[in-house]
Image (tube, rainbow, N blue to C red):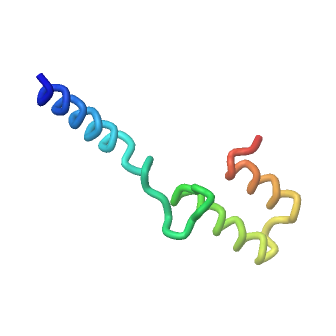
Amino acid sequence: MVMMFFGWLFFIIVLVLLIRPDYFRKLPGNSNGESEYEAGAIEILKERYAKGEIGEEEYLDKLKKLRGGN
């Protein structure tokens, strides 16, 4: 009976990891919990701002949206 419980528990954990593998993955040294996608998007945004392609207001607005703000 106990083995059956652990079998189902293992199955559910594997299923969750297959459905959402990036849920537990974080970038090394990334203490604020940004996903790999968010970190890449923020880097691109920083580069565009540094090159002058976008202004400060647009940069701050997009940065806020990427970090989950409205």
Who's the residue at 81% across and 52% down the image?
61
Look at 80% across and 61% down and name the residue there: 59
Farthest residue to the bottom: give it: 51
* Residue 9 higher or lower than 58, as above or below: above
Against 69, residue 27 (above or below) is below
**Residue at the image position 72 percent from the left and 48 percent from the top:** 65
Quadrant for residue 60, please give it.
bottom right
Q: Tally the marks.
A: 0
- Using the image as rendered, state which of residue 8 and residue 55 is in the foreground: 8
Estimate the x, y position of residue 63 in percent, counting from the top left: 74, 56
**Residue lying farthest to the top in this orientation:** 1
* Quadrant position of residue 54: bottom right
Determine whether, in the image, residue 35 is placed left or right of residue 61: left
Foreground residue among 16 and 70: 16
Res. 30 image quadrant: bottom right
Report whether 29 appears left or right of 70: left
| Residue 62 screen position, x and y as percent | 75, 54
